[in-house]
Image (cartoon, rainbow, N blue to C red):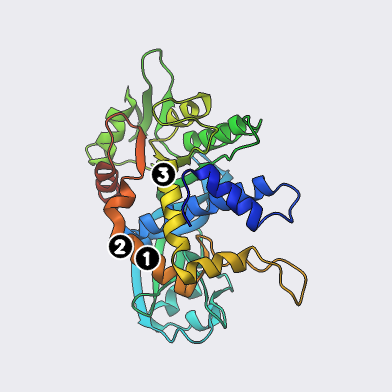
């Protein structure tokens, strides 16, 4: 299959997979959003951040732990890791995992989350929290390339978060929800970190409490000093990263409309996934037989039950063979994939500097 634009992809999905739904274009748009999340997950995995990653985390607001927001990905400091070889032909349940001798003492102090990391067939769960207490979370994921299950005991506080935002075409005009989605993303980005923004005419100032005193300076000056550990100790700092895609509503990275500007002034980093990038990914993935079959299955009706099948092509719930192929695809094409993104903020930012900052922020 060859597509000249993401709108052609959306139309193809709407006509071939979602024609039974009330609004096939919206349903296809949600599927495109899932692709954006998958790209983000495997990007972080390829960059080497999988063992410190949690998916769909409830991230608290700074200074108000009673208010939390569900975000796609968070990165945490690692307290302890372990791994063991596994047989991928059988079911892997939390009950089995919790018998791991390396974690017996730790597990005893954690509230258990009884889920299957792999079912009886070929479906695995990524970034799964299998236990937690007030200070830490215990995650597990399957390393499909090396047939191992890997465990990470992580600090509960996140030092970085990634959110994906996408709005699809609504006929020939923008849908009324686009600015609301942008505002929602901006609110979360502005409230989850101890480094806060102060609006000024020419640029944003930042304010942060350090040793009981308030430090005020140009926002990205403080941000850089925190990353480089020139300001310490810093509590509850969380780098915020947004991944946005266009598809007709948010214009382009060089021609930002209101929604993109709202987001660019709220996230520490805002990456713009180009239409060409998303189109290329979908086209390449659909040329991989196991991935195409997993996608088709996810949006098909089960003949026996008459209900839609379980989605086995998402960032957190994915077919094992698809996981292997997508991991291989990213490993072999990472330079090309990184070029799919334009940096909207910070000014003069680059993918390399983002990766460097994510590495430096470990242990903050």
Q: Which mark is residue 106?
A: none
Q: In the rendered image, which residue does mark 3 sit on?
A: 276
Q: Residues within 10 Å of mark 3 (few under 14, many from 20)?
A: some
Q: Is residue 354 left or right of residue 192?
A: left
Front residue (pair 146, 98): 146
Position of 15 with respect to 290 (left or right) is right
Q: Quadrant of residue 325?
A: bottom left
Residue at 45% of width from left, 42% of height from top? 275
Label 2–label 1 contact, CB within 8 A = yes
- Above or below, 231 relative to 362: above
- Identify residue for label 1: 327
Q: Could you tell me how far apart the alpha carbons at marks 3 and 1 are, in whole angstroms?
A: 20 Å
Across and down, in percent, residue 231 comes to 26, 36
SS class, disc 1 = helix
Residue in view at x 34 percent, y 36 percent: 343
Which badge, 3 or 1, comes first in the chain's sequence? 3
Crowdedness near tag 1: few (<14), some (14–19) or many (≥20) residues, C-alpha within 10 Å: some
**Does 30 appear above or below 246?**
below
Of the numbered discs 2 and 3, the one sitting upstream in the chain is: 3
Disc 2 crowd, CA 10 A, few/some/many (<14, 14-19, 20+) = some
Which structural element holds mark 2?
helix
- For the image, the number of numbered tags is 3
The answer to whether the residue labelled 2 contacts the one labelled 3, judged by CB atoms less than 8 Å apart, is no
Quadrant of residue 142 in the image?
bottom left
Say which residue label 2 marks: 331
Q: For the residues marked 2 and 3, what is the alpha-carbon distance in whole angstroms?
A: 19 Å
Q: Could you tell me residue 71's position as x and y percent? A: 52, 49
* Residue 205 against residue 293 in the figure, above or below: above
Is 32 positioned to the left or the right of 236 in the image?
A: right
The residue at 36%/18% (across/down) is 203
Name which quarter of the figure residue 120 lies in. bottom right
Instruction: Give SS at disc 3.
Output: helix
């Amino acid at each position: 299959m060859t597509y000249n634009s993401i709108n052609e992809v959306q139309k193809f999905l709407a006509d071939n997979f979602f024609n039974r739904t009330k609004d096939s274009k919206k349903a296809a748009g949600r599927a495109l959003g899932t692709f954006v999340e998958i790209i983000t997950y495997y990007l972080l995995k390829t960059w080497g951040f999988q063992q410190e990653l949690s998916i769909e985390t409830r991230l608290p607001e700074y200074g108000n732990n009673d208010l939390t927001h569900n975000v796609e990905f968070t990165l945490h400091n690692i307290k302890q890791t372990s791994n063991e070889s596994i047989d991928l032909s059988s079911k892997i349940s939390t009950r089995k995992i919790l018998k791991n001798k390396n974690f017996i003492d730790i597990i005893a102090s954690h509230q258990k989350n009884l889920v299957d990391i792999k079912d009886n067939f070929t479906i695995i769960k990524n970034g799964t929290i299998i236990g937690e207490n007030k200070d830490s979370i215990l995650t597990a994921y399957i390393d499909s390339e090396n047939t191992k299950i890997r465990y990470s005991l992580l600090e509960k506080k996140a030092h970085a978060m990634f959110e994906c935002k996408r709005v699809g075409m609504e006929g020939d005009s923008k849908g009324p929800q686009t600015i609301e989605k942008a505002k929602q993303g901006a609110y979360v980005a502005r409230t989850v970190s101890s480094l806060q923004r102060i609006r000024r005419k020419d640029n944003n100032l930042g304010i942060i409490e350090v040793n009981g005193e308030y430090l005020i300076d140009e926002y990205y000056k403080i941000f850089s000093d925190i990353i480089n550990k020139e300001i310490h100790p810093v509590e509850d700092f969380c780098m915020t990263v947004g991944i946005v895609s266009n598809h007709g509503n948010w214009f382009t990275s060089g021609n930002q409309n209101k929604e993109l500007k709202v987001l660019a002034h709220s996230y520490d980093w805002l990456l713009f996934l180009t239409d060409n990038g998303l189109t290329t990914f979908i086209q390449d993935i659909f040329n991989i037989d196991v991935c195409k079959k997993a996608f088709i299955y996810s949006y098909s009706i089960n003949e026996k039950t008459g209900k839609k099948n379980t989605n086995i092509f998402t960032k957190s719930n994915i077919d094992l063979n698809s996981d292997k192929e997508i991991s291989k695809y990213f490993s072999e094409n990472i330079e090309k994939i990184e070029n799919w993104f334009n940096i909207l903020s910070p000014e003069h930012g680059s993918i390399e500097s983002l990766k460097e900052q994510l590495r430096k922020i470990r242990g903050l």
